[in-house]
Image (cartoon, rainbow, N blue to C red):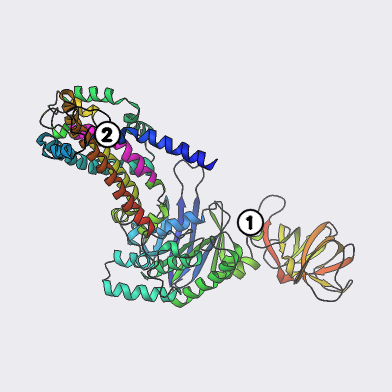
Amino acid sequence: MRTLRNLGLTLLYLFLLAPIIVVFIVSFDTRQYLAFPPASFSFGSYAKVFANEAFLSAFGRSVVIGLVVGLVAVSIGMLLSMALVRYRFRGREGLNFLVLAPFLVPSIVLAVGLMLVLSPVGLLDTYAGITLAHLGITIPYTVRTITMSLMAVDRRVEEAARVHGASAFTAFRRVTLPLVRPGLIAGGVIAFLISFDEAVISLFIVSVRTSTLPTEIYRYLEYSTDPQIAALSVVLILISIAVVVLVERLIGLRRAI
Amino acid sequence: MTDSHVIVEHLVKTYPGASAPSVDDVGFSLPRGEMLALLGPSGCGKTTMLRMIAGLVAPSSGSIRLNGREISQIPVHKRNMGMVFQAYALFPHLSVAENIAFGLEMRGVAKAERVEKVKRALDLVKLTGLGDRRITQLSGGQQQRCAIARSLVIEPELLLLDEPLSNLDAKLRDEMRDEIREIQNRTGVTAIFVTHDQDEALSMADRLAVMSAGKLEQIGSPREIFDRPQTDFVASFIGAGNFLTGQTTGRGEAQVEGVGAVRFVGEAAHGSRVRLLVRPHRLALVEAGSGGVNRFAGRVENVVYRGQLMSITVAAQGVRLQADIPTHAGALPERGQQVTLSVAPEDVTLVGAEASPPMDPAI
């Protein structure tokens, strides 16, 4: 029974991981097209990826956009969460829905809408435009994670800070903020990864000047299908894993202490 | 009156949307160094009272004066209060020492002095050497001590405690009760604490304020509250009691139906209807037919043996009396037996009087 279950689990994971495994193996191929199994093994594709100017500059742009989106989405998410969790005001339900809305709308609809809105104000293919677009789809996530953390904060603890001499802002900075830190970190990382990964909306908004890595990959695939793309995919997977492990360490370690 | 540290006058709090005020025209004064208990059932407004004094809730009207200075408009963080919360509300991300140092830091106390004061505070609450612990590593009692240290280290004008013992188990509760009292004595801080537990209030407080439905029913020393309750609510909320209803026939004497003349303490106009309180443990068994006042003869209906005491229910001509009598190894009353109970006139308290038939309400 136990071995049967283990076998089932192994097969399930194999099935889930199969595309990644295939990509990983193919990335070492030397032929000029994507095929499985590979005919030969080398690191040539990796060398080409790291020498590809288009990839490198797009990677740099994606990282910068991702970091800005992460930071801003967390800041706005914090303010929104404070409003939604702590205050009862008119239009609270409406705001809550607005925050949730991007979850419900298909990316392609958002993309077309954003393009139509950003175009007349001259924000197409600008950093401001792509950052705004990514904020729209990441803020729902940061609001969720921060709201969760904030709801777990005992208000009496904040009151204790106030009574013992902290102004409202100091109490927020010294007590509330450190207590919602896990939510801030989780939200920030999710926002970064979504922005870094996002292709559909970016394709509609960016062109040559601000092309992100996913759009650059898409464009490359239109004309060629060589193992470079597989090698790049492996690099991206490794980056994602690195980020997740880092976060696990950051939040996990704090809990362990 | 000259050295009243805290004076509260006509304090009212009505929460938005509430039909009745949570605190309704409450006033009292508290001398320096005394400990006041706000006692009452849940929802009586005692916690709202405490939170208004702390500055966490803004009063609808009325005044709170501290050292003669009006503080109701001063923001919470500038009032210099120390407060111990019900679930302690310690900062979970800080160590014990950092928790205690928080108020000092807010007041801009220099590092070296902070360390010194935190050390003394830790000694005061018997947490010596535990400064580096995380809050989660402390037991319930230790967290309580840490919360007390945090609020005392800033040498507050007032120490406020919100149900300080309700989160502790019974054994620890008795221990902390004595300890809080001792710390308060030693530091001489004026303190106000909220509780719904009358034993706690009676044993810890210098002064006791009983609240009900937002109103202050009575304020006085624990003895005054227990022995001379002025309202029906106080009489029935604190301790057990037998209530007798009668009509005054003279100074300190009333005619109680079925029982006869009962002598009591208190002023009531001649001929008014009065309610009298007799505590069960103030009733004593006496020889049948022995002379004297306040004799109640009757048949024992029920007995409950409780070790040091025995509770008996006596049906005495028309009234049923509960009496707690001390036990001994000799013969004790049994069910069905005829007994005579007696009570000294000073142990019969007048709790309510109204002029009977209409007009002219008695004092």
Residue A249, horizontal then vertical, whole percent:
32, 53
| Residue type for callout 2 | Val
Tag 1 subunit = B
Of residue A36 and residue A72, the one placed in the foreground of this image is: A36
| Residue type for callout 1 | Phe
Category of crowding for the residue at label 1, using alpha-carbon neighbours closer than 10 angstroms: few (below 14), some (14–19), many (at least 20):
some
Local SS, label 2: helix
Residue B8 on the magenta span: no
Q: Which residue is mark 2?
A: A23
Q: Residue at x 59, y 68 (%)?
A: B171
Of residue A199 and residue A90, the one placed in the foreground of this image is: A199
Residue B316, horizontal then vertical, whole percent:
84, 61
Q: Which residue is mark 1?
A: B233
Of residue B135 and residue B198, the one placed in the foreground of this image is: B135
Determine whether A78 is above or below B3 in the image.
Answer: above
Over which residues does the magenta segment extend? A130-148
Please give left or right for residue B175 compared with residue A215 in the image.
right
Q: Residue at x 53, y 60 (%)?
A: B167
- Marks 2 and 1, how far apart at CA: 80 Å
* Picture quadrant of residue B72: bottom left
Please give left or right for residue B259 compared with residue B16 in the image.
right
Q: Residue at x 89, y 71 (%)?
A: B288
Residue A141 on the magenta span: yes
